[in-house]
Amino acid sequence: MRIDGDIDHWEQEGTDRMRRSKKERYITIDIYVPRARWEGVSGLQIREYLVACVEEAFRKMIDKLQRDKVAVDGDALLRDFATVREQYLSQLQAVALH
């Protein structure tokens, strides 16, 4: 993640710079978070934004791997992520209720 702040800012938002190493068997993507997405907003809003960015990143990486004919169970990954997203968002909501 590249998060805009006082020291650095990238003037962009969302996912970019996907890199895949066939030799090392990994794929990465950068997530850019502009200051306006975290400054002055609630913790829940930040979490909702972050999970949306991570889901977008997963979808782009799955698409890339499928185009490259790499066996990947994208549906299973997205189902697992949906479970994680629900838990991640509900943790903060539960704390806010107390």
Image: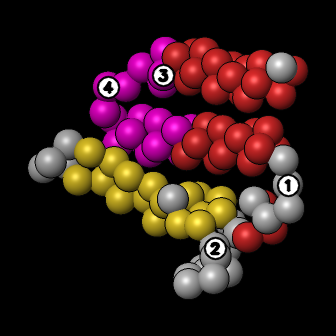
Is 95 part of what is drawn in magenta? Answer: no
Residue 2 in percent (x, y) is at 53, 66
Looking at numbered disc 3 in the image, what kind of residue is underneath it? Leu
The residue that appears at 85% across and 54% down in the rendered structure is 41
The residue that appears at 58% across and 21% down in the rendered structure is 84
Q: Calculate the distance from the C-alpha at mark 4 to the C-alpha at mark 2.
A: 35 Å
Residue position for label 4: 71
Label 3 secondary element: helix
Q: Nearer the viewer, residue 98 or 59?
A: 98
Task: Place residue 35 in its image quadrant.
Answer: bottom right
Q: Calculate the distance from the C-alpha at mark 3 to the C-alpha at mark 4.
A: 12 Å
| Relative horizontal placement of residue 31, taking residue 53 as reference (left or right) | left
| Relative horizontal placement of residue 36, taking residue 22 as reference (left or right) | right
Residue 75 in percent (x, y) is at 53, 18
What number is the disc on residue 4? 2
Find the magenta span and give its range.
58-77
Residue position for label 3: 77
Looking at numbered disc 2 in the image, what kind of residue is underneath it? Asp
Q: Nearer the viewer, residue 72 or 85?
A: 85
Looking at numbered disc 4 in the image, what kind of residue is underneath it? Ala
Residue 62 in percent (x, y) is at 47, 36
| Relative horizontal placement of residue 59, taking residue 26 as reference (left or right) | right
